[in-house]
Amino acid sequence: MTPDAAVATKTTYREAMREALREALRADDRVFLMGEDVGRYGGCFGVSLGLLEEFGPERILDTPLSESAFVGAGIGAALNGMRPIVEIMTINFSLLALDQILNNAATLLHMSGGQLSVPLVIRMTTGAGRQLAAQHSHSLEGWYAHIPGIRVLAPATIEDARHMLAPALADPDPVLIFEHGSLYNASGELAPPAGPVDLDHAAVRRPGTDISLITYGGSLPKALTAADELANDGIDAEVVDLRTLRPLDGTAVAASVARTHRAVVIDEAWRSGSLAAEVSARIAETSFYELDAPVERVCSAEVPIPYARLLEQAALPQTADIIAAAHRAVD
Amino acid sequence: MSADVATRAEHRGELLHAMLRIRRFEERCVELYSAAKIRGFVHLYIGEEAVAVGVNEALTAEDAVVSTYREHGHALARGLPAEAIMAEMYGRATGCSGGRGGSMHLFDAGRRFYGGNAIVAGGLPLAAGLALADRMCGRSRVTCCFFGDGAFAEGEFHETANLAALWDLPLLFVCENNLYAMGTALQRHEAQTDLALRAASYGMAAWAVDGMDVEAVERAARRAAEGIRGGGGPYFLEMRTYRFRAHSMYDPDRYRDKAEIERWKARDPVTRLTDRMRADAEPVEDRLGEIERQVTEEIDAAVDGAERAPEEPVESLLQHVTSPRTEAT
């Protein structure tokens, strides 16, 4: 696969992400990749496989299991002229670096009165569905979306996996990219590049007129499947991919609700205090008089994600739950 | 006086000036705090001046400094204008952080002064990153990170020490061991109180220094900085020092024995240096008078400038949250 292929190519989310990294490393000497097992192992999820051989150990840095130190080192290197991409294995481990992300990366520009920007990209996996139990399965990206001073991205498609990294690196401020673990094996046709991804706006993945299914990341494929099945029931669902969780594109959400007058918000995080709560609140603020039914939310059960397959699946938002919520809103 | 002796006397005079500048600045801060001119948490460095001044002698303008919340001394030694610091403490637009930081978050990108970190040990990983970028770019620079003995209990110190030694980072760890983590004495917060010994276990050069002797600090810092510039990886200096004042302006200082404070005051770095100058028959009294006059003038001007400086307009509240962007075309 070449980055400038003129025709659609068959690829996976994982390969698309790797190609994005390769392109970034080739394009700019200041870019380097740092994280746990990104080098010799090839990345815990295989994303960086082969990059060590191509770019060498000075640019593909295996780190100790020291999330706080290597995320902080990414911040310092960004302050000192580099363009680091830091990989944290999972969002759960990022909590060990939360001090550096919140108290330094997100805050330095402001505390320094605009003197110090932190052009840093941090990538990590999020989400459940692979029977990894509670300490490897949570969806905490909504917590990060709470924080001013950082941009929070959730690539849900192969195109976004391939083309979000370049604009993220071009951002002068810290960008967090959340990759849902269940998406890595997703395969499909990667269309010829349509230019860099617009990181300020949500994307309508499927137009519709009867109800808005608003989601992001790992729940997007479920929402699209739900929309297909709803079509069989005569319900024309629009699917909105938030794509950027901070800054949230409230305008796109309001525009969709203005077209459909009904909304289901799907979020793999827990319902209480979630991004789904924020989206619902915004709909209430901006689109109250557009609504023909209460906003529905499909979120994870309020339980640490269990290991057992049936319990895990029951805890997560599923296509059937989305369909049921849509029916409640429409019928 | 021979040329060497004259040079030494001149240099000692400069060290004295730098230390007194910090001390008088902070004494003025006490008055201004009492007068409610400056607010927030204010952590004074009085007693520890020899560390900032001695270490700064070993650094160049190209080097970087990462500091803590007790950073007025580091900032002044680094060359930040007293007025920019004072204006910051007043929360004024002309402050070195545009009024967003206050006493605990002084920044000066041009002077490579990277704060101003109020999370204990929080600046250490960041310093490793500054040093990493220099190493990757082949620049012969030192990143100097100040932190206190309290930081030894934080994982971030140990993660950073490991990373710095593992990657041979050009990083100078300067631990200001003033014997107290806020109000908790070293022997009550560390299982092993020999901090240089523990740092050495990471495989870096590490030793303890009399932090009340500015010349000893300078010698140690020069030796470490030269080692780092020569590719010797990270160095660790444990500065044995003491703060004469409480942890912060809010602290009633009930956890220390007054006799202990007096014992350390007998080792005051300013007195120590002036005594040495007298013993070596160097001109002290005239020099002291001149320094006091200059320092008073500088601080008066700083306070006056801060008093007159404009407030940040409320309309600027949301500035500096994200960088200014050029509109996509």
Image (cartoon, coloured by chain):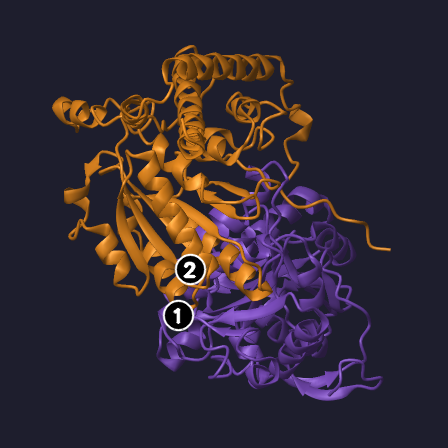
Which of the labelled discs sits on residue A304, or is there none?
none
Q: Residue at x 47, y 19 (%)?
A: B38
Q: Colour of chain B?
A: orange
> Is B115 placed above or below B269 here?
below
Task: Tell me the quarter of the image containing the N terminus of chain B.
Answer: top left
Q: Residue at x 43, y 74 (%)?
A: A314
Residue neighbourhood size for the residue with mark 2, other residues' Cα within 10 Å, grouped as few (<14), some (14–19), many (≥20)? many
In the rendered image, residue A180, in percent from the top left (x then y), is placed at 54, 72
In the rendered image, residue B258, in percent from the top left (x then y), is placed at 15, 22
Give yes or no for contact between labels 1 and 2 (Cβ–Cβ under 8 Å). yes
Q: Amino acid at mark 2?
A: Ala
Q: Which residue is mark 2?
A: A69
In the rendered image, residue A183, in percent from the top left (x then y), is placed at 58, 78
Q: Earlier in the sequence, mark 1 or mark 2?
A: 1
Q: Residue at x 15, y 27 (%)?
A: B260
Task: Tell me the quarter of the image containing the C terminus of chain B.
Answer: bottom right
Is any atom of residue A142 visible in this view? no
Q: Amino acid at mark 1?
A: Pro
Task: Tell which of B91 and B132 is nearer to you.
Answer: B132
> Is A170 placed above or below B51 here?
below
In the rendered image, residue B238, in percent from the top left (x then y), is placed at 29, 47
- Output the letter for the chain in purple: A
| Discs 1 and 2 share one subunit | yes
Is any atom of residue B176 visible in this view? yes
> Is B251 placed above or below B185 here?
above
Which of the labelled discs sits on residue A64, or is there none?
1
